[in-house]
Image (spheres, rainbow, N blue to C red):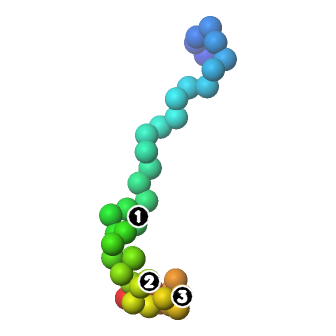
Amino acid sequence: MKKTQGHVEPRQQGGVMKGELDGYETQLAAMVEQYPDATLLEYCEY
């Protein structure tokens, strides 16, 4: 059985999720500046 807490408010969600690209903002900006017409696949190859 579940414990009753006396209210119907949702519990707080988990912490912050980090993306795989966090910390690469400057590198990505430089790549886009150097190769503005590249596709996502081409950026992954650099």
Please give the residue where the numbered disc 1 appears in the rendered image.
Answer: 20
Determine the residue positioned at 58% across, 11% down.
5
Please give the residue where the numbered disc 3 appears in the rendered image.
Answer: 39
Quarter of the image holding residue 29?
A: bottom left
Q: Is residue 13 visible?
A: yes
Determine the residue positioned at 43% across, 40% down.
15
Instruction: Name the mark nearer the viewer: 1 or 2.
Output: 2
Q: Position of residue 34 (x, y in %)?
A: 39, 90
Q: Residues within 10 Å of mark 2 (few under 14, many from 20)?
A: some
Calculate the distance from the C-alpha at mark 2 to the C-alpha at mark 3.
10 Å
Instruction: Name the mark nearer the viewer: 1 or 3.
Output: 3
| Identity, as a three-letter code, of the amino acid under mark 2 | Val
Quarter of the image holding residue 3?
A: top right
For the N terminus, which image quadrant? top right
Secondary structure state at the residue bearing disc 3: loop
Q: Is residue 45 visible?
A: no
Upstream in the sequence, badge 1 or badge 3? 1
Determine the residue positioned at 40% across, 64% down.
20
